[in-house]
Image: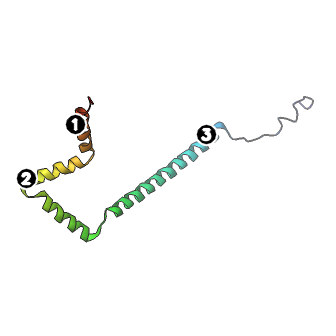
């Protein structure tokens, strides 16, 4: 052994990391990063929820004014409530779709 070309090369024992150890460290780091990302996302969602909730608050005066004007415009009884519900529905995306469909059908040939 002492006379061979490899005599000094393999004499020292080196403790290197195994592939399992390297992969487990990577997995732990990825899990930690995922937990941090989830915590950050939850924090941002909470901030957004609080922001939206804060925007909805308009104090006591605006709420009472709005409820009075709604009562006046809705009239009374079932007919007024139905008209109010239909008006609210037509103001949104559904109303836009209906109007586009009707006008598109009328002016399609032109």
Q: Which residue is mark 1?
A: 102
Can you give x and y, in whole percent of width and height, for residue 89 in the image? 21, 48
Res 43 quadrant in image: bottom left
C-alpha separation, residue under disc 1 versus residue under disc 3: 62 Å
Q: Which mark is residue 52?
A: none
Q: Is residue 109 above or below residue 39?
A: above
Q: Which mark is residue 23?
A: 3
Single out the residue that lies furthest toward the left.
Answer: 77
**Mark nearer the viewer, 1 or 3:** 1
Which SS class for mark 1? helix
**Mark nearer the viewer, 1 or 2:** 1
- Of the pair 21 and 46, the residue shown nearer to us: 46
Residue drawn 18% across the image and 50% down it: 87
State left or right for residue 27 relative to residue 94. right
Q: Quadrant of the N terminus?
A: top right
- Of the pair 6 and 29, the residue shown nearer to us: 29
Residue drawn 82% across the image and 40% down it: 12
C-alpha separation, residue under disc 2 versus residue under disc 3: 69 Å
Single out the residue that lies furthest toward the right.
Answer: 3
The way the protein has been coloured in the rendering is rainbow
State left or right for residue 47 relative to residue 87. right
Q: Quadrant of the C terminus?
A: top left
State left or right for residue 51 relative to residue 65. right
Can you give x and y, in whole percent of width and height, for residue 72 in the image? 13, 62
Q: Earlier in the sequence, mark 1 or mark 3?
A: 3
Q: Which mark is residue 78?
A: 2
**Mark nearer the viewer, 2 or 3:** 2
Res 49 quadrant in image: bottom left
State left or right for residue 108 relative to residue 46. left
Contact check, label 2 and label 3, Cβ < 8 Å:
no
């Amino acid at each position: 052994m002492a006379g061979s070309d490899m005599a000094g090369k393999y004499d020292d024992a080196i403790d290197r990391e195994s592939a399992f150890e390297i992969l487990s460290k990577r997995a732990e780091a990825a899990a930690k990063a995922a937990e941090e990302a989830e915590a950050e996302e939850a924090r941002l969602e909470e901030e957004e929820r609080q922001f939206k909730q804060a925007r909805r608050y308009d104090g006591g005066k605006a709420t009472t004014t709005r409820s009075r004007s709604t009562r006046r415009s809705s009239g009374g009884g079932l007919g007024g409530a139905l008209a109010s519900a239909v008006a609210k529905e037509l103001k949104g995306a559904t109303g836009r779709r209906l109007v586009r469909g009707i006008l598109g059908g009328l002016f399609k040939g032109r």
